[in-house]
Amino acid sequence: MPLLLPPLLTLGPDAVPETRPSVLLRLSLCAAALAAASALPAQAPACDAGLTVPAGFCAQVVADRLGAARHVVVASNGDVLINANPSRGGAESGTGSGPGGGLVLLRDTNGDGKADLVRRLGGRGGTGIAVADGYLWATDRNNVVRYRFAVGDTVLGAVDTILGNLPTGGHTAYNFVVRGRVLYLNVGSRSNSCQAADRQTRSMGVDPCIELEGRAGIWRFDAHRPGQTMADGRRFASGIRNAVALAWNEPAGELWAVMHGRDQLAMNWGFSDAYNAENPGEELLRIREGDDFGWPYCYHSMEEKKLVLAPEYGGDGKQVGRCATKKPAVYAFPGHWAPNALLFYTGRSFPSAYRNGAFVVFHGSWNRAPLVQDGFKVSFVPLRRGKAAGAARTFADGFASEAFKGNRAAGPPAAGVRNHRPTGIAQAPDGSIYITDDLSGTVYRISYQGK
């Protein structure tokens, strides 16, 4: 139940506090109430999410039917802020998951892990979101805007358009990272593989690929300067087809990403269905200024375990060619899992094995047919000194049914079953993590209860 405190005194800059007994009594009651609250046992969370997580962890549903909940951030007071994309969600899921589009605030006022305050703040919706320095930044269609916003606010303040008229067509998530005065922006490619006729059988690649002049990379802008366009930015890194999973690695002080790999190796170039399902690998990238990761000329072969030349540029799945000069991935996941969020864990409530490693949220595939679709999970990669310190392992699974993935033998979903596509991830001040789902509009909290 909410804690009710006696009214406190408000003192002016030159005021001297009263010492009447009534004032002292109110102060005494405040101290007693706070002491009593700190002595109350924490409420045990309801581990009701139906997800598969490691022993000792608890996954619970925080809120549901929020529309297409994309990226998420948790403020220092525990408020959860989400950007929802208007082009996805309820209609796509067929579940009536609620309105899509705009910023949403969730607050748990009684400590049970559930959002009992759900406030739609406004905005037109998108993917990226960040809170820092008295502002909330968000993707707003093909713009990045900034609102005056103090932690604890439940309304948005004045708005500025920081970046306007970003390119349309193709990959347009426009997610970003704010780091001090710098805003790093993902600008995805317009095409699949920079073909002369995009996604057409055996159409060769444009060489050099002119898309690289203004897309398929990371651009750097001033986070606090309104009225910018692409012309005001500086290209920070290139050869990245689309990096919806973009994050600052706090322990290393570096920008990292996970790239969406290209499609249609089987359909356009005659590779086997099995090869197409696993390739190219979804690449975890350590990004430094000036890096070139090879798209569209190269892709990561899961068989060769390295970058190989794309067939649009004369490759055969084994030949390396010009890819020898491109920067390789730190780690690669199976193809088409669609990495949509990345988090470097710095909390202390999870076991120490998770410290400073990377959680990657996979949205799940659509293009591994006729094989079963895959992804729809959260994976964890242990890291040490900028390199993978072991194989990735599944951290949270069970978001999507086998029928949803295309396993016909599994039959239709059971009555009442809704499918979910994990999309965003954020760490809370208490060390728990929040995961969003943009298909059924669910928000999850995963905490550690073990010893």
Image (cartoon, rainbow, N blue to C red):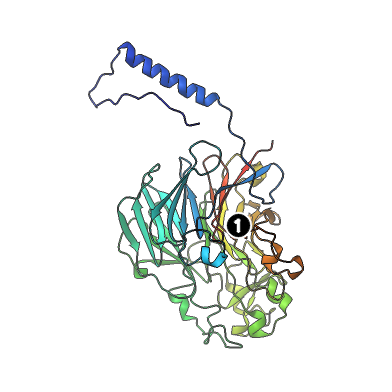
Front-lying residue, 259 or 160: 160
Q: Is residue 315 visible?
A: no
User: Label 1 amino acid?
Assistant: Val
Callout 1 crowding tier (Cα within 10 Å): few <14, some 14–19, many ≥20: many
Identify the residue position indicated by label 1 in the image: 360
Q: Is residue 414 left or right of residue 230?
A: right
Q: Is residue 275 left or right of residue 313?
A: right
Query: Visible in this render: residue 19?
Result: yes
Front residue of 31/242: it is 31
Which image quarter: residue 379?
A: bottom right
Dot 1 falls on a residue whose secondary structure is strand
Q: How many marks?
A: 1
**Depth check: 216 or 307 in front?**
216
Single out the residue that lies furthest toward the right: 409
State the image coordinates of residue 395 (x, y, percent, origin top left): 67, 52
Task: Spot the residue most to the top.
Answer: 21
Q: Residue 146: which quarter of the image?
A: bottom left
Residue 211 higher or lower than 44, as above or below = below
Q: Which quarter shows the C terminus? A: top right
Q: Is residue 371 above or below residue 106?
A: below
Name the residue: 62% across, 85% down.
314
Q: List x then y, in percent, for residue 12.
A: 24, 26
Which residue extends farthest front? 415
Image location (x, y in percent) of residue 182: 40, 56
Relative vertical location of residue 310 with respect to residue 357 in this rendering, above or below: below
Residue 254 locus on image (x, y percent): 51, 55
**Residue ID at (65%, 58%):** 417
Outermost residue, left side: 14
Relative to the observer, which residue lies in front, 366 or 381?
366
Tell me what residue is drawn at x 61 percent, y 53 percent. 359
